[in-house]
Image: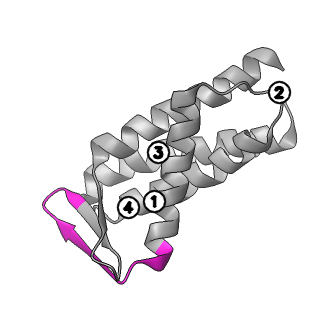
């Protein structure tokens, strides 16, 4: 496994730990953005790795997480709403992050990394 894929695996492990261990204890939806940051780092490595054949669902998850991180950087307003975290843009568009959505992306991106490990 290449050094970059090892780093991606570490980022996914950190994202998983934050989502499954830290988030339930702290119960702060802003941690969902932190999980997405780690997943985005891993996803960008996976996209660049030519040996990994991504499924359309895996590519969509990587792109969706990248968009979430980009929206977070550009958001005018962010706030917690019940169990979700809302990112609002200047043009009244918004995104809602939930634990279920972030967990889905985590599982999908992890499966992409396993694809690369199987072919390497």
Label located before the other in sequence (1 or 4): 4
Which labelled disc corresponds to residue 31? 4
Local packing at callout 3 (Cα closer than 10 Å; few below 14, some 14-19, many 20+) is few
Q: Quadrant of the N terminus?
A: top right
Q: In which quarter of the image is the C terminus?
A: top right
Is 116 displayed left or right of 112 in the figure? right
Is 119 displayed left or right of 59 in the figure? right
Which labelled disc corresponds to residue 113? none
Q: In 3D space, how far apart are the residues under numbered discs 3 and 1 (Cα atoms)? A: 19 Å
Using the image, determine if residue 5 lies above or below residue 74. above
**Closer to the eye: label 3 or 4:** 4
The residue sitting at 35% across, 77% down in the picture is 89
Label located before the other in sequence (2 or 3): 3
Label located before the other in sequence (2 or 1): 2
Would you name the residue on which mark 1 appears? Answer: 68
Q: In 3D space, how far apart are the residues under numbered discs 1 and 4 (Cα atoms)? A: 13 Å
Label located before the other in sequence (2 or 4): 4
**Residues under numbered marks 2 and 4 in contact, where contact means CB atoms less than 8 Å apart:** no
Element marked by disc 3: helix
Element marked by disc 4: helix
Q: Give the range drawn in magenta.
A: 73-84
Label located before the other in sequence (3 or 4): 3
Q: x and y percent of residue 112 in the render? A: 62, 29
Element marked by disc 2: loop
Residue 95 among those drawn in magenta:
no
Classify residue 66 by image quadrant: bottom right
Q: x and y percent of residue 64 in the render? A: 48, 49
The residue sitting at 56% across, 32% down in the picture is 58
Which residue is the extreme one toward the top?
Answer: 118
Element marked by disc 1: helix
């Amino acid at each position: 496994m290449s050094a970059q894929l090892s780093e991606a695996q570490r980022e996914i492990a950190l994202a998983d730990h934050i989502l499954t261990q830290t988030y339930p204890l702290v119960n702060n939806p802003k941690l969902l953005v932190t999980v997405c940051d780690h997943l985005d780092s891993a996803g960008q490595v996976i996209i660049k790795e030519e040996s990994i054949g991504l499924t359309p669902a895996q590519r969509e998850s990587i792109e969706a997480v990248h968009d979430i991180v980009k929206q977070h950087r550009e958001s005018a307003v962010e706030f917690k709403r019940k169990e979700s975290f809302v990112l609002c843009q200047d043009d009244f568009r918004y995104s809602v992050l939930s634990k279920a959505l972030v967990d889905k992306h985590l599982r999908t991106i992890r499966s992409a990394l396993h694809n690369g490990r199987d072919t390497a």
